[in-house]
């Protein structure tokens, strides 16, 4: 759900040209503003584009919080929503799932949050803990319900989490989807031990987070990419080895070579159809495969014999719960980690941010900074 096939991106982004031509609308500067800027989906040919509008701030419910959003991080799913969808009309849907800001008001039955607290949104509206269930998918910000790209957003108190100390708004905004997905992928099969080998595919948001987390746990991280420049950038973040899969198309053989035939204790697969076989080949005996995405397609087959013969495990990763987020936040604060951000754009340059996201020529995350409200 959170990925978009590379071959479809360019055409989608072209439809966004000019959608930020209107000057931004100022939000009310009072503690309880009555109007807000927000970005919604508007029909275009083909599919949808972003539209910046002014709208009323909804009334605050008993179990809701009003957040002044300062930054929003983009995900590949934000591009996917621009594609035509004959089964549903998405017009008017507020976009994006990952925002960071300040609580400026709380409903009368809210107990875990207070005015002035720095928070982020969560990908799922109501997955606070426990096992994942089918109903959780029905309440996803920016997908099945309104997202968070606006100056003032009302969220259920189950849909926010306290941001880790020491992070900027822009850094905190990268956590709800990419950060938490990576954390779950790294920890779902148990805590890594120092010296474990972890293979991370690519250099996008999930991959850079996974490399940061695994390196902080003392693991040896091997990164795959089609770009030597990106591999060098990842080494500056603490990864030990890089494999260019254009130079080494059978990159799993290179993993085995680098590990003297042992393989990886954990492989984080974001590629999907075209990478699953290599991921399994790369595993060590007793290793684990975290399946995160499907950049090359989701219909790939996992070689079951390869898992069986290595007594290995494969697990699908779909972001995580608020309880998972809180564990991640503690780890980030303890190890003083900072998310990798490639570029921050002002909201009015959202079309340019989407073009960069679609092109994929970056390492880490792409973030939008919302302008302060009038009077600040």
Image (spheres, rainbow, N blue to C red):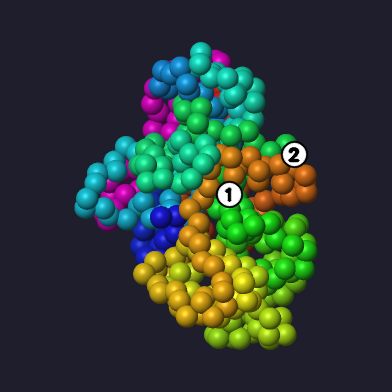
Q: Position of residue 176 (x, y in %)?
A: 55, 44
State which tag comes first along the sequence, 2 or 1: 2
Which quadrant is home to the C terminus? top right
Name the image quarter holding residue 273: bottom left
Tell me which residue sits at (77%, 44%) in the image: 334
Q: Residues in magenta? A: 28-56
- Regarding residue 147, the answer to whether it shows in the image is yes
Q: Position of residue 72 (x, y in %)?
A: 54, 42
Q: Residue at 59% x, 56% y: name it.
A: 188
363 part of magenta stretch = no
Query: Residue 16, percent across and down?
Result: 38, 51
Q: Which mark is residue 89?
A: none
Is label 2 in a helix, a strand or a loop? loop
Q: Residue at x 51, y 27 (%)?
A: 157
Which residue in the structure is indicated by mark 2? 166
Q: Mark 2: few, some, or many residues within 10 Å (few <14, many ≥20)?
A: few
* Disc 1 packing (10 Å; few <14; some 14–19; many ≥20): many
Residue, disc 1? 180
Viewer-side label of 2, 1: 1
């Amino acid at each position: 759900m959170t990925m978009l096939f590379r071959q479809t991106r360019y055409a989608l982004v072209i439809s966004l040209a000019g959608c930020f031509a209107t000057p931004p609308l100022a939000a009310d500067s009072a503690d309880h503003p009555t109007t807000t800027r927000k970005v919604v989906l508007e029909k275009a040919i083909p599919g949808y584009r972003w539209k910046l509008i002014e709208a009323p701030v909804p009334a605050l419910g008993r179990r809701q919080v009003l957040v002044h959003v300062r930054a929003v991080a983009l995900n590949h799913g934000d591009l996917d929503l621009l594609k035509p969808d004959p089964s549903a009309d998405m017009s008017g849907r507020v976009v994006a799932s990952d925002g960071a800001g300040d609580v400026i008001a709380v409903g009368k039955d809210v107990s875990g949050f207070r005015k002035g607290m720095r928070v982020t949104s969560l990908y799922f509206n109501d997955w606070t803990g426990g096992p994942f269930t089918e109903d959780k998918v029905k309440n996803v910000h920016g997908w099945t319900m309104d997202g968070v790209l606006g100056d003032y957003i009302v969220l259920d108190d189950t849909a926010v989490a306290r941001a880790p100390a020491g992070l900027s708004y822009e850094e905190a905004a990268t956590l709800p989807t990419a950060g938490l997905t990576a954390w779950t992928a790294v920890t779902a099969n148990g805590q890594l031990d120092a010296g474990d080998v972890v293979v991370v595919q690519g250099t996008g948001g999930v991959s850079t987070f996974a490399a940061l987390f695994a390196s902080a746990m003392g693991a040896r991280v091997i990164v795959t990419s089609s770009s030597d420049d990106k591999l060098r950038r990842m080494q500056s973040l603490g990864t030990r080895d890089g494999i260019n899969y254009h130079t080494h198309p059978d990159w799993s053989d290179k993993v085995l070579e680098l590990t003297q035939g042992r393989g990886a204790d954990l492989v984080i697969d974001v590629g999907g159809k075209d990478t699953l076989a290599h991921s399994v080949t790369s595993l060590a005996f007793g290793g684990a495969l975290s399946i995160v995405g499907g950049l090359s397609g989701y219909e790939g087959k996992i070689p079951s014999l390869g898992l069986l013969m290595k007594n290995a495990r494969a697990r699908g990763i779909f972001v995580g719960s608020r309880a998972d987020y809180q564990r991640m936040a503690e780890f980030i604060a303890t190890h003083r980690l900072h998310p990798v951000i490639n570029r921050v754009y002002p909201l009015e340059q959202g079309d340019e941010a989407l073009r960069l996201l679609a092109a994929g020529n970056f390492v880490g995350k792409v973030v939008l900074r919302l302008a302060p409200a009038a009077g600040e």
